[in-house]
């Protein structure tokens, strides 16, 4: 049912407007509200906190559909679901869940996740954003975060800052931020290669005050929370990659039957057929690996390695499939008149955020060898 709902919205509402959102870079607020009203902004969030109360496999099925409609929409959806709601559901207090998760899961507000800084991405423990505890238990935050998805529009943010730089990873704490308070500033929206309607910006904290009850989890537990949230987030990005790849594949299959050269459909050439076969194999393998990771998560089993395997495989497959799609479309593949040009640009981000492909390889190899 959730797949049907997501597919209907993706095909009827999102796909037809994807090109214009890509061109304008406008944030698709109305569509995001619609996704929220249909339970797609908090798929794994229990119904008592405004979510759909479903499992990780449902999340994958819905994400694939929305990403096939438009990748930028699925980026916003994945941050709300995986990076924002997931961490608060796992580590938050009852009051935090009611305040922060409900608004995002219902699609009334937008959430964001702020880990990366101008000088630290993959090496997140070298963050400089600093939160200093006051005598009354409150924290004062100063520093910058960069590349924050939905930063330009988010109401609430899960923020990671160092409370004890000498402790490295163990000195990082997670906080819940309300962007309507004093001391919070947004930078300019980044002009991007792809997922252009997903607004991204730098954010800055200048003496922003966090109340004691706005700490997420324990002081010093932030890095562990971030890594756990990113494990789950990678299932979302793998699903996004599968969705982009599927859209590129389907557009290509339709094109090779229609376009003729040397008196026959280009799909009849063996070289094209080999490409179609390889695209399909990579697409199916990616989907199945993503479902495996989601199923393990749903069973309460360890899934860190499987999430990295799914994200690495699906993101590289999406890039490869979109590349073939452009090639098979010939000159038309290079034109903004056809969607494959957008799929090609959108696919690239899946190899970068929530851990680059190099970082996924590192995670997988460490899991397999036990060596660090
Ligand atoms: C559109 C977009 C949206 C984003 N959204 C968010 C968000 O919402 N919240 C957030 O916190 N962040 C976000 N990010 C940041 C993203 O997660 C980082 O860009 C990513 O983790 C890589 O970090 P970096 O850009 O600093 O690259 P670097 O860490 O500087 O890496 C540069 C290159 O070095 C390689 N490298 C680094 N370390 C190693 C190593 N140990 N071994 C081998 N190779 C290595 C990398 O793989 C990469 O190829 C977003 C980024 C983009 C582009």
Image (cartoon, rainbow, N blue to C red):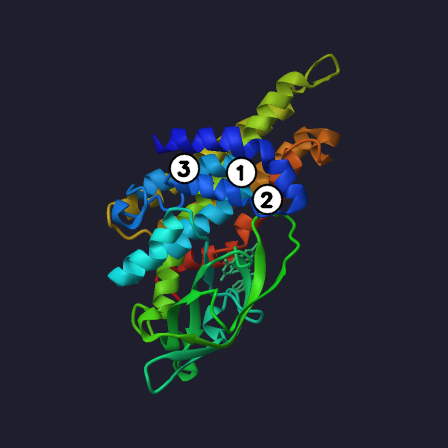
Residue positioned 38% across, 52% down in the render: 103
Sequence-first disc among 2 and 1: 1
Residue positioned 45% across, 72% down in the render: 125
Q: Quadrant of residue 345?
A: top right
| Secondary structure category for the residue under label 2 | helix
Quadrant location of the C terminus in the rendered image: bottom left
Between 286 and 1, the residue placed more toward the observer is 1
Please rate how many residues cluster around mark 3, counting C-alpha atoms within 10 Å: few if below 14, some from 14 to 19, many from 20. many
User: Against 309, is 146 above or below?
Assistant: below
> From the Cβ of disc 2, is ligand 1 less than 8 Å away?
no
Residue at the outermost top position? 263
Q: Quadrant of residue 343?
A: top right
Residue under circle 3? 62
- Mark 1 touching mark 3, by CB under 8 A? no
Sequence-first disc among 3 and 2: 3
Q: Which-is-in-front pick, marks 1 and 3?
A: 3
> From the Cβ of disc 3, is ligand 1 less than 8 Å away?
no
> Residue 244 has which mark?
1
> Residue 346 has which mark?
2
- Mark 2 touching mark 1, by CB under 8 A? yes
Q: Is residue 16 left or right of residue 66?
A: right
Sequence-first disc among 1 and 3: 3
Q: Which-is-in-front pick, marks 3 and 2?
A: 3
Q: Is residue 363 left or right of residue 75?
A: left
Residue 190, given in percent of the width and then of the height, sits at: 63, 58
Residue positioned 40% across, 31% down in the render: 5
């Amino acid at each position: 049912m959730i797949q049907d709902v997501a597919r209907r919205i993706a095909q009827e509402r999102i796909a037809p407007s994807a090109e214009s959102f890509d061109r304008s870079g406008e944030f698709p607020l109305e569509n995001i509200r619609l996704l929220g009203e249909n339970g797609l902004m908090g798929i794994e969030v229990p119904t008592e906190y405004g979510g759909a109360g479903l499992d990780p496999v449902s999340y994958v099925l819905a994400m694939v559909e929305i990403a096939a409609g438009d990748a930028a929409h699925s980026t916003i959806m994945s941050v709300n679901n995986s990076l924002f709601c997931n961490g608060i559901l796992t580590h938050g207090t009852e009051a935090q869940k009611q305040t922060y998760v409900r608004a995002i899961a219902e699609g009334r507000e937008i959430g964001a996740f702020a880990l990366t800084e101008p000088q630290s991405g993959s090496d997140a423990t070298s963050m400089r954003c600093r939160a200093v505890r006051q005598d009354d238990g409150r924290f004062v935050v100063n520093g910058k975060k960069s590349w924050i998805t939905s930063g330009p529009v988010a109401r609430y943010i899960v923020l990671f800052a160092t409370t004890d730089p000498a402790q490295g990873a163990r000195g990082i704490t997670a906080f819940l931020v309300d962007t309507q308070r004093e001391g919070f500033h947004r930078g300019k929206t980044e002009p991007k290669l792809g997922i252009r309607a997903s607004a991204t910006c730098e954010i800055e904290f200048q003496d922003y005050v966090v109340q004691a009850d706005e700490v997420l989890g324990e002081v010093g537990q932030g890095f562990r929370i971030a890594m756990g949230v990113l494990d789950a987030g990678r299932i979302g990005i793998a699903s996004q990659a599968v969705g982009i790849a599927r859209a590129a594949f389907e557009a290509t299959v339709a094109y090779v039957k229609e376009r003729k050269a040397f008196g026959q459909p280009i799909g009849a050439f063996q070289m094209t057929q080999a490409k179609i076969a390889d695209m399909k194999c990579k697409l199916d393998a990616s989907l199945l690996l993503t479902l495996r990771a989601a199923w393990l998560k749903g069973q309460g089993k360890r899934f860190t390695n499987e999430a990295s395997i799914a994200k690495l495989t699906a993101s590289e497959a999406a890039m490869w499939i979109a590349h073939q799609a452009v090639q098979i479309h010939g000159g038309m593949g290079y034109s903004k008149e056809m969607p494959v040009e957008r799929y090609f640009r959108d696919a690239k981000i899946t190899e970068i955020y929530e851990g680059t492909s190099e970082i996924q390889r590192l995670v997988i190899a460490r899991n397999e060898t036990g060596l660090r």
